[in-house]
Amino acid sequence: MKLWQYTTTVVLSVMCVGLSAAIIITSKSNLAIQEEIQGRQQKLNNGVLGQQAQQITGNILQDMAAVAAKNEKMRKLLSQYGYNIPAAPQSPSKKTAAQKTPEEI
């Protein structure tokens, strides 16, 4: 083996070891950051803010469902995300005077 081949091999080997060490350090750092974020998220979900957010979300969905019963565009939007809302039935109380029976007048 020639000297330049030996030197090239040693340099490439040292670079591989250095890059491996950098990858290990970076992955451990990322893991620590991810655990910190998950801890913060858990605190938010379990705290007052998390409960309020869940209540607000439920109220928003109920309001959207009420609108979707009368609005086709809203019904289509909700159905894209898995919420199937039936159309509002026509109420029989909207009879005109000509349609009402004599007992109702």
Image: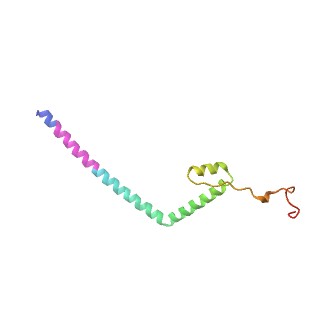
Where residue 81 appears, as percent x and y from the top left, is: 55, 51
Which corner quadrant holds the N terminus? Answer: top left
Which corner quadrant holds the C terminus? Answer: bottom right
Is residue 47 highlighted in magenta? no
What is the magenta segment's predominant secondary structure?
Answer: helix
Count every numbered label the image shows and give the total: 0
Q: On the rendered structure, is 13 left or right of 97?
A: left
Residue depicted at x 38% and y 59%: 36
Q: Answer with the quarter of the image where residue 35 lies.
A: bottom left
For the record, the magenta segment spans 8-23
Q: On the rendered structure, is 12 left or right of 3?
A: right
Q: Is residue 50 above or below residue 76?
A: below
Where residue 97 appears, as percent x and y from the top left, is: 86, 57
Residue placed most toward the observer, 85 or 50: 85
Is residue 17 highlighted in magenta? yes
How are the residues colored? rainbow
Residue depicted at x 31% and y 50%: 26
Q: Is residue 4 above or below residue 57?
A: above
Residue depicted at x 63% and y 56%: 65
Residue depicted at x 67% and y 51%: 71
Q: On the rendered structure, is 77 left or right of 95?
A: left
Q: On the rendered structure, is 90 left or right of 99?
A: left
Where residue 33 appears, as percent x and y from the top left, is: 36, 56
Q: Is residue 101 above or below residue 77?
A: below
Where residue 34 appears, as percent x and y from the top left, is: 38, 56
